[in-house]
Amino acid sequence: LIFNPHHDPASSDYIILISAVIGFLVFISLLNNAGHYQIASHLFITSVVIIPWVSLLVDPSILAGDFVPLTYITFSILLSSLFLATNITILIALLQFVGITMVIVLSPAREAFNWFSFIAFVFVSSIFSILANAIIQRDMEQIVNQTHQLEQAKEHLREQSIRDYLTNLYNRRYLEETLEREIQRVARKKASLGVILF
């Protein structure tokens, strides 16, 4: 919109497109703030995937060789690598790559323009995004595993702190914790408490 000449007929269409995109992003933000995180993230990724292709309808100069608006499809692949699973990121990258290939086949200016560099750019961006996604997924799995191990270690330490090592019977700490809890319970219920100590 900024760099298109003002007399370009696509300028008004871009104003409408950008206004619609901003309105949609505000709607997604409101959904997110209302706690609908999953819906908001899926709508956001979907919009990032679709919007660059809408520019084909708005700006016919893209098919004439002005591929710059289509470079924004790499954002959908990059964002997918941050928020979605690796197989979904690969699927989005493939769909975008097929879409670019179709545009090139349908473009009357394909011989006059360096489409190979553009396809190489999209391909390399996709590969880096997929690799980044795989690394992020692996790191997340490690974090989940380490958290699970920490929880198990915490439970094990807790068990060790309330049982005698030799007899495996509950120790004085367990008695104090349990007695305090039971005193609070009977106080709430206005009941009595009996303690037998061996």
Image (cartoon, rainbow, N blue to C red):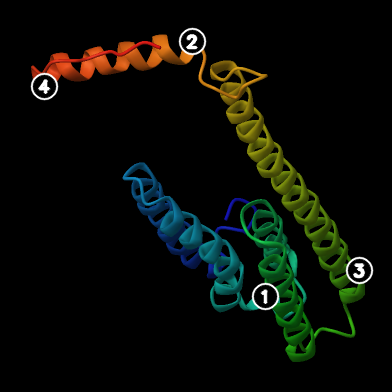
Q: Secondary structure beneath disc 1?
A: helix
Residue 26 image point, x, y percent: 38, 49
Residue 134 image point, x, y percent: 79, 56
Disc nearer the start of the sequence (4/2): 2
The amino acid type found where label 1 is placed reads Ser
Residues at marks 4 and 1, CA–CA distance in whole angstroms? 78 Å
Disc nearer the start of the sequence (4/3): 3
Disc nearer the start of the sequence (3/1): 1
Q: Is residue 195 left or right of residue 19?
A: left
| Vertical placement of residue 61 versus 191, above or below | below
The amino acid type found where label 2 is placed reads Arg
Residues at marks 4 and 3, CA–CA distance in whole angstroms? 77 Å
Q: Which residue is mark 1?
A: 61
Residues at marks 3 and 2, CA–CA distance in whole angstroms? 71 Å
Instruction: Select label 3 or label 2 by which is in front.
Output: 2
| Vertical placement of residue 49 versus 132, above or below | below
Residues at marks 4 and 2, CA–CA distance in whole angstroms? 24 Å
Q: Which residue is mark 3?
A: 117
- Tag 4–tag 2 contact (CB < 8 Å): no
Q: Residue at x 57, y 61 (%)?
A: 48
Which image quadrant: the N terminus? bottom right
> Is residue 19 among what the camera can see?
no
Q: Which mark is residue 173?
A: 2
Disc nearer the start of the sequence (2/1): 1
- Tag 4–tag 1 contact (CB < 8 Å): no
Instruction: Select label 4 or label 3 by which is in front.
Output: 4
Q: Which is more toward the observer, 132 or 180?
A: 180
Disc nearer the start of the sequence (3/2): 3
Image quadrant assignment for residue 52: bottom right
